[in-house]
Image (cartoon, rainbow, N blue to C red):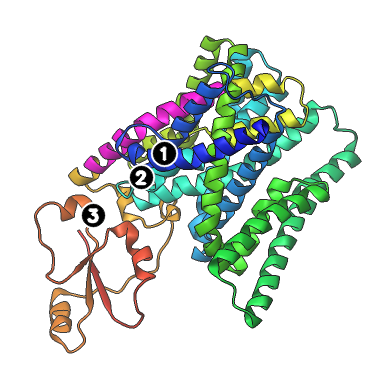
């Protein structure tokens, strides 16, 4: 009975503590992941010794697989393919090279500081190129940050795992000496990039087909559609592994197919699935905290902290600076995006994945990853609130170019059709007519805050939020927008 009580206590503690700290972190310079990672440190072998976790702990493996599967599925869902290709394709094509450049810079830093082999260095670079959407969440939900910047960060966090995961799997194969000849390579790449994604896509398509055919005859409540979505994630993972590919890539492609064919199912999943995913992620933070409390001491602290500086302060800002050099954003926006590339649960999960594959020296790589993640969770958690507030104050003083864009694609040179214009006399006549247009005040924050009242009766919508606002409006009524 005693062995059963420990996991029960952990789950109960996660659920209760998450509710208690959620309000505190909104007004304090900390984050929820920081609280749970710290709790794991306290309970682990390096602290109170209540929770003993090693890299081969089965509970950690199960929670890690569930967490990463949910993260990748949510990444696919949150891409929102239904918003149009340019809304996500342009940022992906632009930010993807940034991820590869980050991998190279971090690998060079690892090689220089730890004298790791090139394969180990590239593995570390790939593991630490992953942007954690959990740690980033407070930033992308704050409306003081321009919508286009938030969407760019969300898109990057939702897609760079699909860039680094294949790199990690290929590099792990090389490290294990399982490369073989050209035929073996082709078979491995086919399983990884073709069979696994096809298996996931097939599960996604079949799940949509089954539930839609059942719903024609019998109603299915939103709660059970949400449970159905959770089941789809697990089945997609198993299908990808069963064909010899990656279950994680299969999960991502299952989510991509579902969001393209039946967003209603994804919408239901987001209601319940996100709560389930949140519980798994927070539990994973506790377990990883307990693991790191005993493993970080195996790595020299000063070189590890120097490496963390390379990863967080040099590699990402430099890579993002190169990617964004021709974009229509302010210098503040470039620095903001360059800084907020937090490392967190995703990097820990990828590091554990390398350990579970049996790569030599993988436990050392996980310990190094852990120190970087701790540094990132602390630094990004502490700086999020003040930097967001500073961004808001800057927009109140002057109009920034990124404020005028509604999507991340606009930052990369999106083109728009010519919008018809009306003169003051034409507008006055229309407003005096029997069917007056709806006036939309889309002035920037600084312009709207200069004391000018605007046109009486107009609706105030920030320029970056117009597209989202328009989705909730009834079609047919004429709209006239005015700005600075």
Q: Position of residue 389 (x, y in %)?
A: 27, 39
What numbered label is drawn on residue 337? 1
Q: Which residue is mark 2?
A: 329
Asked whether the beta carbons under mark 3 and mark 1 sit within 8 Å of each other, the answer is: no
- Overall secondary structure of the magenta section: helix
Q: What is the quadrant of the N terminus in the image?
A: top right
Q: Position of residue 56 (x, y in %)?
A: 72, 27
Numbered range of the magenta stretch:
369-393
Asked whether the beta carbons under mark 3 and mark 2 sit within 8 Å of each other, the answer is: no
Q: Quadrant of residue 468?
A: bottom left
Q: Earlier in the sequence, mark 3 or mark 2?
A: 2
Q: What is the quadrant of the C terminus in the image?
A: bottom left
Asked whether the beta carbons under mark 2 and mark 1 sit within 8 Å of each other, the answer is: yes
Residue placed at 66% from the left, 13% from the top?
Answer: 115
Q: Position of residue 84 (x, y in %)?
A: 51, 64
Q: Position of residue 153 (x, y in %)?
A: 45, 45
463 lies above or below 55: below
Within-10-Å neighbours for mark 3: few <14, some 14–19, many 20+: many
**As drawn, is 248 to the left or to the right of 39?**
right
Toward the front, the furthest residue is 1
**As drawn, is 467 to the left or to the right of 179?**
left
Q: Earlier in the sequence, mark 3 or mark 1?
A: 1
Q: Earlier in the sequence, mark 2 or mark 1?
A: 2
Q: Is residue 392 magenta?
A: yes
Residue placed at 67% from the left, 24% from the top?
Answer: 54
Q: Which residue is mark 3?
A: 444
Within-10-Å neighbours for mark 2: few <14, some 14–19, many 20+: many
**As drawn, is 8 to the left or to the right of 337?**
right
Q: Secondary structure at mark 2?
A: loop
Residue 98 visible to an observer of this rendering: no
Within-10-Å neighbours for mark 1: few <14, some 14–19, many 20+: some
């Amino acid at each position: 009975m005693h062995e059963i009580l420990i996991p029960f206590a952990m789950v109960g503690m996660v659920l209760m503590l998450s509710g208690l700290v959620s309000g505190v972190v909104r007004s304090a310079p900390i984050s929820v992941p920081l609280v749970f990672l710290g709790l794991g440190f306290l309970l682990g072998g390096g602290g109170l010794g209540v929770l003993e976790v090693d890299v081969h702990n089965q509970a950690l493996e199960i929670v890690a697989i569930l967490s990463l599967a949910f993260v990748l599925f949510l990444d696919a869902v949150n891409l929102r393919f239904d918003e149009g290709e340019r809304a996500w394709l342009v940022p992906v094509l632009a930010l993807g090279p940034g991820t590869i450049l980050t991998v190279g810079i971090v690998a060079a830093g690892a090689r220089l500081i730890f004298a790791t082999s090139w394969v180990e260095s590239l593995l570390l670079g790939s593991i630490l190129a992953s942007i954690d959407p959990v740690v980033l969440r407070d930033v992308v939900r704050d409306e003081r940050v321009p919508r286009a910047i938030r969407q760019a960060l969300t898109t990057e966090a939702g897609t760079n795992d699909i860039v680094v995961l294949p790199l990690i799997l290929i590099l792990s194969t090389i490290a294990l000496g399982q490369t073989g000849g050209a035929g073996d390579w082709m078979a491995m790449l086919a399983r990884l990039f073709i069979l696994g994604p096809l298996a996931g896509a097939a599960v996604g398509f079949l799940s949509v087909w089954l539930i839609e055919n059942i719903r024609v005859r019998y109603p299915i409540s939103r709660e059970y559609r949400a449970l159905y979505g959770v089941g789809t994630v697990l089945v997609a993972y198993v299908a990808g592994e069963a064909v010899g590919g990656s279950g994680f890539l299969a999960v991502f492609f299952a989510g991509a197919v579902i969001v393209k064919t039946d967003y209603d199912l994804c919408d239901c999943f987001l209601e319940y699935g996100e709560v389930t995913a949140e519980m798994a992620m927070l539990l994973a933070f506790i377990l990883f905290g307990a693991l790191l409390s005993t493993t970080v001491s195996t790595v020299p602290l000063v070189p590890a902290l120097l490496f963390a500086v390379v990863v967080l302060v040099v590699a990402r800002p430099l890579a993002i600076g190169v990617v964004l050099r021709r974009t229509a954003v302010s210098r503040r926006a470039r620095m903001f995006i360059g800084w907020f590339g937090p490392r967190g649960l995703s990097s820990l999960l990828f590091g554990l994945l390398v350990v579970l594959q049996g790569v030599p020296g993988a436990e050392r790589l996980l310990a190094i990853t852990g120190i970087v993640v701790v540094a990132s969770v602390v630094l990004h958690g502490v700086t999020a609130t003040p930097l967001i507030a500073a961004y808001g104050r800057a927009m109140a003083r002057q109009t920034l170019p990124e404020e005028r864009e509604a999507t991340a694609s606009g930052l990369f040179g999106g083109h728009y059709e010519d919008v018809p214009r009306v003169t003051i006399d034409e507008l006055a006549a229309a407003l005096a007519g029997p069917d007056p247009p709806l006036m939309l005040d889309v002035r920037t924050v600084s312009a709207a805050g200069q004391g000018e009242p605007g046109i009486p009766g107009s609706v105030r919508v920030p320029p970056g939020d117009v597209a989202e606002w328009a989705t909730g409006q009834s079609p047919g009524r004429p709209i006239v927008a005015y700005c600075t």
